Amino acid sequence: MKLNPKLLALMTALAAGAASAAPPAPNTTSTGAGVTISNTATATFTDPATNAAATPVQSNTVDTVVLPQPGFDIVYADGTNDGNTLGNTTKTVTNATPGQSNSTDYYVVNNGNTPLTVQVTANTSGSASGATVTYLDASGNALPSSTTGGVTTYTVTLPAGAAGMVKITQVITLPGNAPANTTYGASPEGTVGGTGTGTGQNGIPTGSTLYENQTVTTTNGTTTVNGTPAQGADLQFVKLTTFKPSLSATPNDPNTPNPTAPDGTTPATPPTLGTVQVPTVPAGTANTPNPTNPAQGYLSTPSNPGDPTSGGTPIVPDLTGNTQIAYPKADPDNNPTTIPAAGQTNDQPGSADIINFTNEVKNAGTVSDKVQLYPAGPDGKLLAGTTFDASTGTFTLPGGIQVVFLGPNTNAAIPVASGATYPTLTVPAGGSAVFRTQVITTDANDNLLTNAINIVVGADSLNDADIIADATTTDVILPAAAQFGDSNGTSPLGAVPTPAPVQQVTPSSNTSPSTDPNLSSDNVAVFPMDVANLGQYTDSYTLSATVAGLPAGATISYVNSSGVALPTNGAGKFVTPVVAAGQEIVVYAVVTVPTGTAAGNYTVKQQAVGNYSTITMTDLNDVIKVGAVGDVALAKFVQDGKTSAGSNSYAGINNPQNYTVNNTSALPGTNIVYQIIGKNNYNSPVANFALNDSVPPNTTFQGAVLTINGTAVSRVIYKVGAGTWSTTAPTVGTPAGTSIAVAADTDSDNIPDALPAGSSMELVFTVKVN
């Protein structure tokens, strides 16, 4: 800014410096324009005639009218030096917020000797668009103005002399949608249009324009505007820069110094990181009953009845990746009272699952910041389809998942601050605020293919215009899910609960396992089983099976496709390799059926338990069908009164005491006592079992006594000759040649009962020699 001698008074005042903030002063030293300067001369002398002082002689009067010498400036009212640009002005406002207004006082100072009409417009060179600039008078009222072509011009009437200093106020109002870290600004720029250089005019040639701190020069009768300083070179900018959030959202970070609660002042203590066990063992790892690795993490805090993991779900923060991952187990609620034929036996649909993450928002800026929290989508805005209930602080996401942001000290929903839309934190400058992200998921069956639950927590500063996250962090839940049952082949992923396969076997002494389910001539039942990990983390599974009714010698095992038995745990149960998330393996339940197993159907009851997830699954509908094998042996002995039991036998049947298979003798009139023994060597009952004999020649029938396994039969039926079955015994003396059949009939239907597998029926048949 060039100095004009007529500004000396003003500069003297400004020389006191900004600290004194001395107000500027108008030009009071120049004679006002239009003032008439009159001058009359006199002559004094000694009258030669009298030699005394003569009467002075007065000349004519000469009048000179002072012409206008225009000049003006606009200066900061507080004395700050002007002559700046938006880029280098010292009048700055930082951390401005959208919609904020800033007022700056100026003086329009008359540096000349003539009243001026100053036209003031806002110079916004270098400013972002959208701000509004208005000019007010000393009373706070808008100056007279007119708008042409979108430019508003304000009029300041500027007297000359002592009154030639008029206070005005520039008001800059930022747009309500002002982006963060954006520069706005303005300076008042004054002009005076020329009305002429003659008396009664403003001293500026008609058609010329006088800018701030310029002067006029008259040379050889021609008046021109001195163009120094140039237009726009003597301005007084005010710069406003909108707030630039310096936020970062992070997982739980116990190393953050001086963390606070959402109010920004109350100290808060995030959970301490310790060692947690999480299911991250690589897929395929064998013999791993506990498929976990240690990791630095914390348990879902505080523990709550809705947490699916007893004692709290382990959560592992990854500060580098700005995520934290929760590994919940299957919850134990709503277990069925009756074990299903196939499917889950725990974690049926029930109460919602609740996991509490601990998160932080850090503020690297130099001023405190208010931050609102919400589940964010890819665009940083509220996740599409999400609703918010301000009365409970609950966000409901598409699919029904709910998110509530809680205070770490109160565990209550964080309230919505005035002017905010969502729950609000106050994050101190250079500090952090701790909060909890409570994720509430519906509790469905853990037997459906599931996806990871990703909650992107958005943190948006209230000091910018939009609701777009200035920082995000991600909380991840990896749910558990699995299926166990009969293999469905290669696809789709999962097991088949029905139909129930039936494996037919032939009992034998073989104990070698097989993986071929198509053999029916051996004694090995093979059931291919799918173990499908439908969850989001790796897990191994403990397998066990029982088959009620099989005799000693039966074996039950699980083998892989190569026939190699799976390893067992301390309880003798079998452990699968670790199964990758979203993958399945096929194992084979192998049951050997020993010799002597009764024919019939045997149900195989199988169970699989996730070693980390604790998901418990059953398959109770596989069947082993054992066919009938064996024969019926029959021996007839005669009483001799001397032969030791078991000393001679026939057809594998030992002789009773005092009976023999050898020939004997008898006198007329004496009895011959036979013992007929029939044995069921089949592995199943033999129906309609009866013993038959005929009265030999030269004898008569005397009696028949029936036992089974040496025990008397409660109801015996007889059939004589071609008669029918009845409880009427043959008459003593029935003649030779008569056929007599004898059977047990415990159910009283007059039909011979079945003889159980392995049982013997004994008939003592007595005749008398004629």
Image (tube, helix red, strand yellow):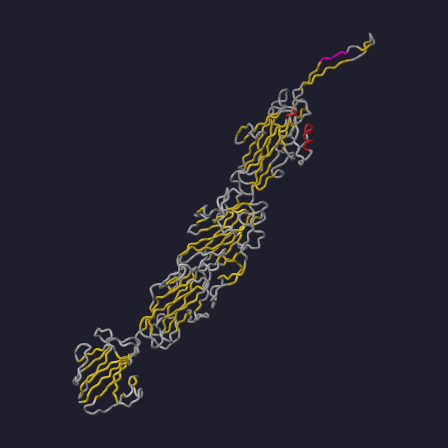
Q: Taking 320 as reference, is 553 above or below it?
A: below
Q: Which quadrant holds residue 53?
A: top right
Q: Quadrant of the C terminus?
A: bottom left
Residue 727, position as x, y percentages in the image: 20, 77
Q: How many marks?
A: 0
Q: Is residue 204 visible?
A: no
Q: Is residue 481 magenta?
A: no
User: Which residue appears farthest toward the right when viewing the image?
Assistant: 51
- Residue drawn at (71%, 16%) of the image: 39
Q: Is residue 59 magenta?
A: yes
Q: Pick the residue in front: 39 or 626.
A: 626
Q: Is residue 392 left or right of residue 626?
A: right
Q: Taking 326 as reference, is 626 above or below it?
A: below
Q: Quadrant of the N terminus?
A: top right
Q: Pick the residue in front: 15 or 666.
A: 666
Q: Pick the residue in front: 175 or 761.
A: 761
The magenta region covers 56-60
Q: Is residue 182 left or right of residue 528?
A: right
Magenta stretch, overall SS: strand
Q: Taking 37 as reference, is 748 above or below it?
A: below
Q: Which quadrant holds residue 620?
A: bottom left
Q: Is residue 520 visible?
A: yes
Q: Pick the residue in front: 116 or 430.
A: 430
Residue 469, position as x, y percentages in the image: 51, 47
Residue 684, position as x, y percentages in the image: 29, 75
Q: Taking 44 as reference, is 142 above or below it?
A: below
Residue 745, position as x, y percentages in the image: 23, 75
